[in-house]
Image: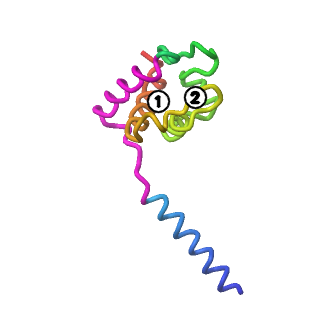
Amino acid sequence: MDFALHKLGISIIAFSLCLIFLTNPVLADSATNLDNGAKVFQANCAGCHVKGGNIVRRGKNLKLKALHKYKVDNVDAIASLVNHGKGIMSAYGDKLTQQEIADVSAFVLKKAIAGWK
């Protein structure tokens, strides 16, 4: 029985490693992607999030302090929020490509770190 549990544990670890290494990483460092992220942001996000703010709910902005507070302070978390939406924020997973979501997420994080300047 111990051998079966050991084998199961190894299988779970191997499966987890496959998931980690076979998923596509978000491309956050390319200037071209950030440029595209800026275009996607302007076309889809700026209406509510002018200069990283939020005209609908003031505290739910894209400033670094708020991103930390709501635990949306990395590219993957931002991408998930853009993809699935939350509360009154619409989901964009059916409107944007995964590359556009990755690009706008990288753009938002970079602008938040720079204080939206």
30 vs 94, nearest the viewer? 94
Give 71 or 24, whichever is nearer the viewer: 24
The span picked out in magenta is: 22-46
The residue singled out by tag 1 in the image is 109
**Residues at marks 2 and 1 touching, judged by CB atoms closer than 8 Å:** yes
Position of residue 88 measured from the top left corner of the image (x, y, whole percent): 63, 25
Residue furthest to the right: 1
Tell me the SS state at disc 1.
Answer: helix
Residue 33 image position (x, y, % from top left): 32, 34
**Amino acid at dot 2:** Leu
- Determine the secondary structure under disc 2: helix
Residue placed at 28% from the left, 32% from the top? 32
Which residue is situated farthest in the front direction here?
Answer: 94
Please name the residue shown 70% across and 84% down the image: 2
Mark 2 surroundings within 10 Å by alpha-carbon count, few (fewer than 14), some (14 through 19), many (20 or more):
some
Q: Which mark is residue 67?
A: 2
Extreme-left residue of the structure: 32
Asked whether, in this view, residue 19 is left or right of residue 8, the answer is left
Residue 64's image quarter? top right
Picture coordinates of residue 63 (x, y %)? 54, 21
Report, in whole angstroms, how far the alpha carbon at label 2 lies from the one at label 1. 9 Å
